[in-house]
Amino acid sequence: MPSDRLDPYGTKKRFERTRAAWGKLTKINVPERGSVTSKVMVLSASPDIDIIGCNVAGTIPGLMLHRVGRSPNAVAYSEFHGGAWRAVTWQEMAQIVARYRTALQFAGLVRGDRVAVLLANCIDWIAFDIAAMANGLITVPLYPHDSAANIRFILAHSGARLCLVDNAGRWNTLAADLERDVSLREVWTRSGDQAPRNVHGTDIRCLSDVLSVAEGDPGPLRCAAQDIATVIHTSGTTGQPKGAMLSHHALLWNAEAVTEFIPPLTSDIFLSLLPLAHSFERTATYHMAMMGGSRVVFARSIDTLRQDLLEVRPTILVAVPRLYERICEAVQSKAAHSPITRRLLGQAATIGWQHFEARQGRAKPPGAITRLLVWPMLERLVARPVLRAFGGNVRVAVSGGAPLSLEASHFLIGLGLPLVEGYGLTEAAPVVTATTLKDCNPGSAGRPLRGIEIRLGSDGELLVKSPSLMSGYWHDPERSAAAIDQDGWLHTGDIAEFHAGRLFITGRLKDLIVLSTGKKVVSATVEAAVVADPLFEQCCVIGDNRSCIVAIVVLCQDRWEVFAKQHHLDPADPNMPTAAAALLTRVTEAMRDPPPFAQIRAVHAVLLPWTVEDGSLTPTLKVRRQVIEHRYQTVIEQLYARQARHRQTNS
């Protein structure tokens, strides 16, 4: 039998370069209380590795110049433009950046001024960012799908003097309610559509016109390693966003530390999916790819993602958990139409997971018959088609930004997707811990990056000490002092545990619901259990200072219609008594035997999903709890009133 038939994933060739790039892993023991510094990996030599370190680069524009010097003719970025993929080399990218630098100088901006960028991921986003920093400016990234009110707040709060936007229509929406005393003096629109030439004293110019006259040598770099490179505003789930100030050194140090977990190869292709305003995307597919000389391809949109994956065939995929979970749901939903297919899919995921656990040293491998006969058939007929949906060439898939459900990770890893996870936050620039293919325990956020210390406070809060911590919050010394104490520890606000040297995030301090009985419930844990059921798209649990917890849930329209038909319910009214009872039963089943005080006692269902645009979600798709509580205040009071009557009846 050929040797590749003995490989449980049939992916030996795909992982060869990754294995060659990784050195030995040094395991650490983390006490339940106290601190730990991790020294995780040492890279072994590989002809496919050409990493430019933090100290060599100095600054982010310095990193680009070093990369141009080493790989002038290699493809740096690709984007879909004019019906085809357009690629630029590192040398061409340097020329684009130089033109942007000159244009910014012509705009009269001086060192320390803030400039904002409101674009989907593209070559211009990167070029504008590098050019601004090279001129000593501070970039303020904005989420393209954020609410207009949030964008206006960030523009005003940061004091941005110039903003690059995608089109005049977007700017017209923002300008309608923009304060007259805002610092913004100039707006560049990427598309050539018409816009008023001046709004509230702000000049509106087409980007092509701006760049067409931007000629000349922009001169040497005017930034230093400890300068503030960017102000990234946090999501603001419980209030207005805070602007984390991050230096060039912090961003580059963090990116270099991550390369020891996922070494970027010169042959790698990153598919850029998350908004570049997201600190995780910025590090993982912008700074890391530039450090390693890898190519970045900007996905067109979520709607075309399936086609982009097949055309681009990325080797590294970075995404939030919801993307992986949706893929799981789609695969399982398609298989549900055939009992045979459903059974084969389940067997493939189960046997593949057994192989994975054996490779991690946590279990024995399957028996000889399963390993040599059953698995090769399932791998060929079931696993490979699923992996082809990711492009068929992924050597590392990264999930970050939120916890990935165990069901999704077990399923995808079982089918052979090389999936790793991590933990971070904007204030840490952003990665704190990560897993690797050789040291992966789904559900865990992994081990700290080299040079980062982590420990637990007295209340279980995770504290972080790192060379990549923010310099503070923009114009907010009070909250800056509260975030980083006098000993240099960042208070993350996350509740955590350590098990066998690995970090596990269990919730958020601000999401800790304290019932009137004194019992404490971690809302994120409850909500994650509910949305693990595909019937529920979104969930927000309520209960602070109440006798029990209740939930507002958003139903998956298609699955709800099937559920309603099966239970003889009216699909237009999910809150009629019989429907509410059926949904509560479904929620209870999803909770997996929680303690009595953590059980959801009542449910109100809605059919329209919560969105960033309606203010329900942050740009990173986290539920704004205060918004939901305010919007459904009357409904919530009714749920608790019914609970009180129920208790009186049964007392």
Image (spheres, rainbow, N blue to C red):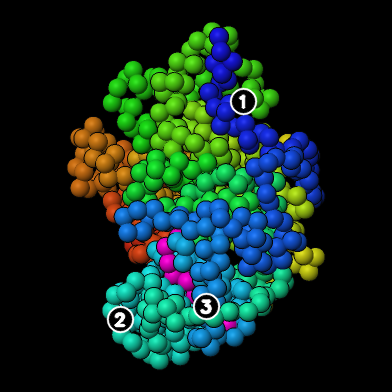
Residue under label 3 = 115
509 and 432: which one is in front?
Answer: 432
Q: CA distance from mark 3 to mark 1?
A: 48 Å
Relative to the observer, which residue lies in front, 277 or 309?
309
Element marked by disc 3: strand
Q: Earlier in the sequence, mark 3 or mark 1?
A: 3
Quick one: quadrant of the N terminus?
A: top right
Query: 307 left or right of 401?
Result: left
* Quadrant location, the C terminus: top left
Type of amino acid at the residue the image marks with label 1: Glu
Towards the viewer: 211 or 430: 211
Q: Which mark is residue 195?
A: 2
Give the extent of the magenta segment.
113-121
Say which residue appears at 62% left-offset and 31% top-offset: 16
Q: Nearer the viewer, mark 3 or mark 1?
A: 3
Nearer to us in this view, 9 or 556: 9
Determine which quarter of the picture holds residue 309: top left
Amino acid type, callout 2? Ala
Residue in the picture at 23% in, 32% down: 566
Q: Is residue 649 left or right of residue 253?
A: left
Earlier residue among tags 3 and 2: 3
Is residue 424 visible from the viewing direction of this image? no
Q: How many C-alpha atoms fall within 10 Å of the one at disc 3: few (<14), some, or many (≥20)?
A: many
> Badge 2: few (under 14), some or many (20 or more) residues near its Cα, within 10 Å?
some
Vertical relation: 195 (above or below) 402: below
Mark 1 vs mark 2: give the one in front: 2
Q: Which residue is mark 1?
A: 357
Find residue 48 and report its image quarter.
top right
Q: Secondary structure at mark 1?
A: helix
Q: Is residue 637 left or right of residue 352?
A: left
Q: Is residue 334 among the parts visible in the rendering? A: yes
Q: Earlier in the sequence, mark 1 or mark 2?
A: 2
